[in-house]
Image (spheres, helix red, strand yellow):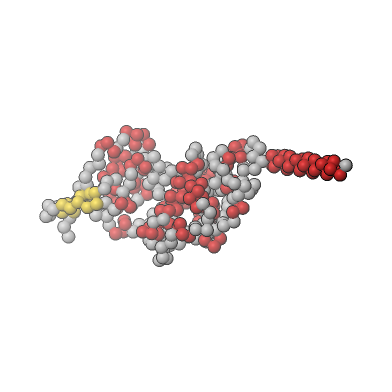
Amino acid sequence: MAAATLTAQPADTLKIKPSFYEVNDYVDENEGCLKCHGEVKYTFEDMESERSLTHAMCPNLILDRDSYYSGVHRSFMCTDCHSGEFEEFPHSLDARMEENFGCLDCHGYDETFADYHFEEIEVEFTESIHNMDGFSCWKCHNPHSYKPNMRDTEDIKEAIRFSNSMCLECHGNFNNFMLLTDRAEISVVDSHDWLPNQIAHIRSVRCIECHTELNDSILIAHKILPKTEAVKRCTECHSGDSRLMHSLYKFQSKENRRGGFVNGVIINDTYVIGANQNIFLDRFSVVIFALTFLVIVFHTVLRIIKLRN
């Protein structure tokens, strides 16, 4: 078999920014991978025939340098997680078939990450409908670019878009969906045609608000429920004790929820009919209505008495 050597097109030096070196000590080593996986094409040569071929890199295998060096794993070297066999080209079948690490392989049972409750998330995942062959944390959380989005967000609308885009990567893209199941294609729009003002709901809440079981001990619930158990009762959210306060807005501090309104934090970001209530104003309005009614009744009685006289 003729020997082959990789001669990928070198990355544009403008793509390797000084800031990358500030967060990663292995930028130069990582470029051994990113000179292919950070580009849209790569070239390899047959050393005996001196022929070369240029191929397009599979889109799913292209990594964005900016995203990687700003993600949670920005300080890593590629071979911290991937086999050293990937340093050889062409990559061996064993390397291509290697099993990727899961979250608990690094983060589990470590006090450093105790606040994130990775162990409880793992339990929820095993009870989720996503617990199937071929599905892992990385189907939703890309390890090469993932950033925590809900805990420190200042833009709730952007956080909602970020979360829903994860779901739509499969549920809105049949090419990805069919890699995990043999089920027929499902239209997200058609399957939610029962939902009033569908667009407004999708823009204002995350899919998981209605498709997960509430959990107060972890920031984001991971137990995805079967569609038959999805929330369909309007009053789950449109009430004084809105479900959103226990899911979408629970990352807000309790102090931010105080100030008179039962769901005060919601009124700062969006208006949810039926959820934005103040018990004192409610009672005051009842008193005003009752007094007004009594005045009308009293006035009517006086007019009747006057007419009779």
Residue at point 43%, 53% (across, down): 168
Residue at point 45%, 62% (across, down): 132
Which quarter of the figure has residue 170? bottom left
Residue at point 82%, 41% (across, down): 303
Viewer-nearest residue: 5 or 72? 72
> Left or right of 195: which side holds 175?
left
x and y percentages locating residue 98 in the rendered image: 35, 57
Which quarter of the figure has residue 178? bottom left
Q: Please say whether residue 155 is visible from this viewpoint.
A: yes
Residue at point 59%, 46% (across, down): 273
Q: Is residue 271 above or below residue 93?
A: above
Q: Residue furthest left?
A: 49
x and y percentages locating residue 47 in the rendered image: 14, 52
Q: Please say whether residue 206 is visible from this viewpoint.
A: no
x and y percentages locating residue 24 in the rendered image: 36, 38
Q: Is residue 21 above or below residue 186?
A: above
> Left or right of 300: which side holds 37?
left
x and y percentages locating residue 219 in the rendered image: 54, 46
Which image quarter holds the N terminus?
Answer: bottom left
Which quarter of the figure has residue 212? bottom right
Which image quarter holds the C terminus?
Answer: top right
Viewer-nearest residue: 165 or 194? 194
